[in-house]
Amino acid sequence: MVDYKGGNIGIFVSTPGSNSPQIRQQKGAAMPFGNTHNQLKLKFSSADEYPDLSKHNNHMAKVLTPDMYERLRSKQTPSGFTLDDVIQTGVDNPGHPFIMTVGCVAGDEETYDVFSELLDPIIEDRHGGYKPTDKHKTDIEASNLKGGDDLDSNYVLSSRVRTGRSIRGFCLPPHCSRGERRAVETLSIEALASLSGDLNGKYYALKNMTDAEQQQLIDDHFLFDKPVSPLLLASGMARDWPDARGIWHNDNKTFLVWVNEEDHLRVISMQKGGNMKEVFNRFCTGLTKIESLFKERGHAFMWNEHLGYVLTCPSNLGTGLRAGVHVKLPNMSKHAKFEEVLKRLRLQKRGTGGVDTAAVGGVFDISNADRLGFSEVELVQMVVDGIKLLVEMEKRLEKGESVEDLIPAQK
Amino acid sequence: MASSFSRILSSKRHIGFLSLVGGSVTAGFLLHREHVSAGTPVRRSYPASAEYPDLRKHNNCMASNLTPAIYAKLCDKATPNGYTLDQAIQTGVDNPGHPFIKTVGMVAGDEESYEVFADLLDPIIKERHNGYDPHTMRHPTDLDASKIHSGQFDERYVLSSRVRTGRSIRGLSLPPACTRAERREVERVVVDALAGLKDDLTGKYYSLTQLTEKEQQQLIDDHFLFDKPVSPLLTCAGMARDWPDARGIWHNNEKTFLIWINEEDHTRVISMEKGGNMKRVFDRFCRGLKEVERLIQERGWEFMWNERLGYVLTCPSNLGTGLRAGVHVKLPLLSKDPRFSKILDHLRLQKRGTGGVDTAAVGGVFDISNLDRLGHSEVQLVQTVIDGVNYLIECEKRLERGQDFKVPPPLKQFK
């Protein structure tokens, strides 16, 4: 031990890397942000690196034991996404006592494979018992939907279906580099430019928007802004904003695509009124067309038999689909069994401002609760059938009649 | 100390020992920048031109200095710990800046960042620190408080005095990049050392993860508690990860010496008291710092420091001394004089509201502190503040008496 006098530690100089005993080996392409230096961490014991999850309430915290952490921490996906990258958002956001967030994200398609030991139980818990061996059915054949064109527009104010798509071979928003994100944007612009007819439209890059364009998109309720939720920020999705982010929509303003927000693509079909069938038709046509346009250019969407469409958040796996309506249910919503009915119909409610907002004037956003384990047609069918029933119950209550005989069984 | 850390450190201590024994020649050789080798290059799927950030709407030091050529040269490099250029500049890419305020736009993830990314950091340092050239210049460190003179202000004007700086523990990554284990080790090392402080420096550590409600309230009332950073300048750099794990506050029983652990830097050291005895504040500051340094050295650790850059901290703006010495001072008349800003500028001082950066001054009370950090020693900077504030008080007094004052000539810079 060197003991020097003089108070000035200037003689100890910055140490050269070549003398450090462990030279960092980099396997695969390493991406920026967060925990690329996984090799450094491996020098320290797993116990020293294991996060403090004692105050946490999210799916990740429920599942990630110290033993599991030790087994998974030396792994990384081919693009260099590591366990700590997956869980950072869950470590930084302990969660809410009442709301159970996921607490994990994927950085690429392989994340779901390499870290399946962590993600499978989370998926099972989040998606109603969906097992690692289960198969997910994809069905975007709109003609399979029965009815849905006659939801009462006196009650159903608007109808909307949204999902997400990821482009195979590219890293996902938490992990992608600028070059990659821009490549996703370029591909998307090119593919979307080929859409025609009812789907003829235009792309608005966030960073090139004029004030007039911006105002119009805000008025249309199309514009998305830089995420502010710490759940998203902590995962790295907002890096380099607004580079390579944009909005495409058709001239009729009924089909909308977000590029590089929470996922590579978010696809939305919507219109005023209760013609969910038409909304779903356009949704399926548009998605199918977009998929073939990407395929023409040599790119497929991330999809597999077990998880369906692969997206950034495990909560959006399978269909990634949320089909919903804004519906007036001032009487039904006050009924004692409202929540129970929704639960049995496999539906969820939100305020018309979105998650956790209050319903204004008795108008609710009602949509499917499930994402994985049911096909797109099945989920939209549940919404169509469920909304029909809820509107019928609303009408009964208006007339002062009972709805007891209409209470459904659990789907 | 965990054995894994002993292994990492052993090589570094040998270098230090060698240079001590071998004298200045060895030290000089090891100082030579190229001797720090970067880690194995980062493999990239896209050319540098496809990855170069869009900085057209940006106004920060990083954006002013990061040419496509420099980006191309550095984008595949990493420090031995694996910290990359993209990580270092992320905060500057994500925060274009303000038309009037020029932020730095870049951080260091470890000590070696300043070497591996020198092609970018040196011009940034030069721009931010008034032409200080790390290539050719040497930073003087001087913590001999006995050299300070006239360090007692007129307490009818000066309400409080404070000196702060930061210190980093050599061998452990900095807050933007550190792993949880490293951050916890910083906490262990520093808390362990602080437990050895005695007399007026005897104190106690409050870990943020274990604060009782009562302790939390007391720390808030004392204005000691720091919270999770909300500024996107900091969060985009990754400094708030895993909050509040391994973060905490230590202060002495007298509440005049305070240390923040694992906030923006490994440690932030603050000496303060009510009134105008800046000499005593600085004396305690130097004593405390030296004692902490001695205590960590006993345990085989040391602070990050070198002759080019002085004390190495996370933000390039805090290099050198990392020192901000300031007072809360009543200048109701002078602050309304149109020459106020010019006087401050000539005296190498800056003003802030008493709530901190960008707050308004309440009741004519301003926070006045040194502008400079690098290229001047601690003693020089504190003396500058003392001389400057005394001058400001003189001006205020003259205005009170209906007299005029002279704008002082600008202080000489090292350029």
Image (cartoon, coloured by chain):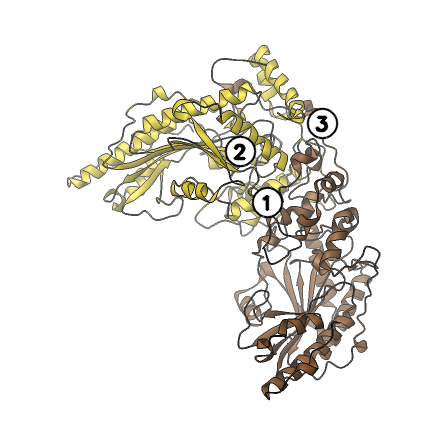
Crowding near the residue tagged with mark 3, few <14, some 14–19, many ≥20 C-alpha atoms within 10 Å: some
Q: Position of residue B385 (x, y in %)?
A: 34, 31
Q: Is residue B267 left or right of residue A166?
A: left
B222 or B411: nearer the viewer: B222
Residue type at numbered disc 2: His
**Does residue A368 show up?**
yes
Q: Is residue B127 left or right of residue A305?
A: left
| Residue, disc 1 | B90
Chain appearing in yellow on the rendered image: B
Q: Secondary structure at mark 3?
A: loop
Q: Earlier in the sequence, mark 2 or mark 1?
A: 1
Residue B266 got which mark? 2
Find the distance from the CA under tag 2 to the CA under tag 3.
23 Å
Crowding near the residue tagged with mark 1, few <14, some 14–19, many ≥20 C-alpha atoms within 10 Å: many
The correct choice, above or below, for A299 with respect to A381 in the image is: above
Quarter of the rendering occupied by the C terminus of chain A: bottom right
Q: Position of residue A245 (x, y in %)?
A: 63, 58
Residue type at numbered disc 3: Gln
| Residue, disc 3 | A22
Q: Secondary structure at mark 2?
A: loop
Q: Residue at x 25, y 37 (%)?
A: B157
Q: Are marks 1 and 3 on the same chain?
A: no
Query: Chain A's shade in the image?
Result: brown
